[in-house]
Image (cartoon, rainbow, N blue to C red):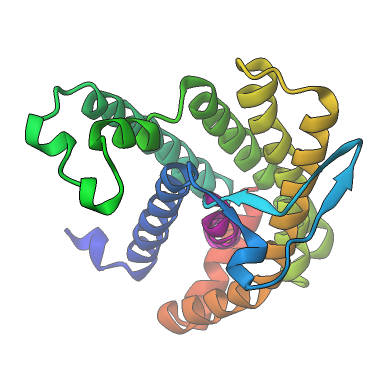
Amino acid sequence: MRQLDDRAVRLFIALAAFFCANAVLAEFIGVKIFALEGTLGIAPLHWSLLGQSGTLDFTAGTVIWPIVFIMTDTVNEYFGKRGVRMISWLAAGLVAYGFLFAYVAIHLAPATWWVGAAKDQGVPDYQAAFAAIFGQGMWITVGSLVAFLIGQLVDIHVFHHIRRRTGERHAWLRATGSTAVSQLVDSFVVLYIAFVLGPQHWPTSLFLAVGTLNYVYKMAAAVALIPLLYLARAGIHRYLGHARADALREEAAATS
């Protein structure tokens, strides 16, 4: 197909595939909670906020989500609102598809020998471990999907609002500004659906404290990855040529 010979089409396919892969991975590895201090090899940092306290523990999915933010802003820059909407709905559909078949896999009858196959590795019941890891629960699944879609839609509008104000200058500002607003929404929506509306019924103070902590972490990671945004831009201009890349950016801005 001649369309696939077009470098812009190839670029969009590559960005969409990488975006979707990261979004799906973030959802599935998010079941693990890791200690940031232990990972960095430092002493635990005890926080206290709104009467709640704890250490810096986050889901493993937060390691990947900043990359998703960068991918969102990159697609926004060159393919506009329509491009981001397309990959966002595609990613959400793939996440739902993944959870559906994880549910099916959990309920397949396990082979008798397989259940105890990992006893020597400290896993006495492989089926129970599999179900615990991949069966994240309906409330968390729904919360993640709703928060992801709302966050993406907010990101699109804020990104292009800033772009209209600044023109093609300050790419870091529209990327960071859109992430700041969208992740403020995302961080609290997912927790509200999963843990306030869900069966755990978190108190308001815990909901606000954990949401704030998650938001600060995501923003710190997003700021730290700003150089990656500029590296992506440089790579795209090198791949497409400056004239074609600039034409795509102008078209994306004009249709926003």
Residue at the image position 15 percent from the left and 44 percent from the top: 117
Along the horizontal axis of the image, is 131 left or right of 254? left
Q: Is residue 182 above or below residue 16?
A: above
In percent of width and height, residue 99 lies at 35, 31
103, 243: nearer the viewer: 103
Q: Is residue 16 above or below residue 187?
A: below
In percent of width and height, residue 218 lies at 69, 55
Q: Is residue 79 above or below residue 158?
A: below
169, 224: nearer the viewer: 224
3, 52: nearer the viewer: 52
* Quadrant housing residue 143: top right
Along the horizontal axis of the image, is 183 left or right of 48? left
Q: Is residue 82 above or below residue 194?
A: below
Query: Magenta stretch: residue 69 in it?
Result: yes
Residue at the image position 71 percent from the left and 44 percent from the top: 182
Along the horizontal axis of the image, is 163 left or right of 31? right
In percent of width and height, residue 239 lies at 41, 80
120, 66: nearer the viewer: 120
In percent of width and height, residue 62 lies at 58, 53
Query: Magenta stretch: residue 103 in it?
Result: no
Residue at the image position 79 percent from the left and 22 percent from the top: 203
Along the horizontal axis of the image, is 203 left or right of 106? right
The part of the chain drawn in magenta is 61-79
Q: Quadrant of the N terminus?
A: bottom left
Residue 76 visible here? no
